[in-house]
Image: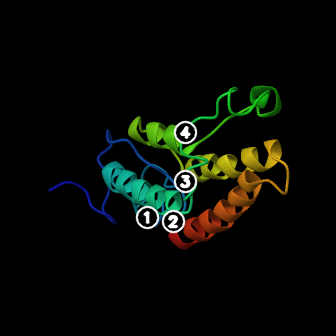
Amino acid sequence: RGPTVGSRMAEDAPKMTEAPGAGAAQKDGDEGPTLRAQDAFKCLVEILQKIEKHDQSKFFHDPVSEDVAPNYFQVIAQPMDFFTVRKKLGERAYKTWRDFSSDLELICTNAMTYNQKRSRVHKAAGHLQRSLRKILRDNE
């Protein structure tokens, strides 16, 4: 059997610090709670799926293109969307809970920065942001 939540991870196994339910970042030699990387990955995928359900219009599902949003890349320095988050999850690019949650927040802040306050996209981004903050808070 491999390591489980609460057991020590193998030294060569990749660690995911600040993962949901893992508590504070763990230092080498610390006997505190741990999560296997695969358990953390599954947890993050489940959280992403919950959050994506709140994007019923699918505004934030795919990367933005200049065809749909002229001058987007002059306004938005770091584009983000659910497709990109899912891709980064698959690549195991998220090393901390903060990295993961920051990308999700970025989806909303980008949309609210680029779109006018009364637009459907801005309003949808505000709704998504409130929902994702609750989901993230409930899963920390």
Tag 4 residue: 62
Q: Earlier in the sequence, mark 1 or mark 3?
A: 1
Task: Please tell me the numbered disc located at residue 32.
Answer: 1
Local packing at callout 1 (Cα closer than 10 Å; few below 14, some 14-19, many 20+) is some
Q: Are marks 3 and 4 in contact (CB under 8 Å)?
A: no
CA–CA distance in space, label 3 to label 2? 10 Å
Instruction: Give me the residue at 50% from left, 40% from top.
Output: 83
Mark 2: which secondary structure? loop
Tag 3 residue: 97
Q: Earlier in the sequence, mark 4 or mark 1?
A: 1
Q: Nearer the viewer, mark 1 or mark 3?
A: 3
Q: Is residue 54 above or below residue 116?
A: below
Q: Is residue 69 above or below residue 24?
A: above
Q: Could you tell me residue 118's position as x and y percent?
A: 84, 57
Q: Earlier in the sequence, mark 3 or mark 4?
A: 4
Instruction: Compare residues 1 and 40 and report the one nearer the observer.
Output: 40
CA–CA distance in space, label 1 to label 2? 9 Å
CA–CA distance in space, label 4 to label 2? 32 Å
Local packing at callout 4 (Cα closer than 10 Å; few below 14, some 14-19, many 20+) is few
Tag 2 residue: 23
Q: Earlier in the sequence, mark 3 or mark 2?
A: 2
Say whether residue 94 is visible: no
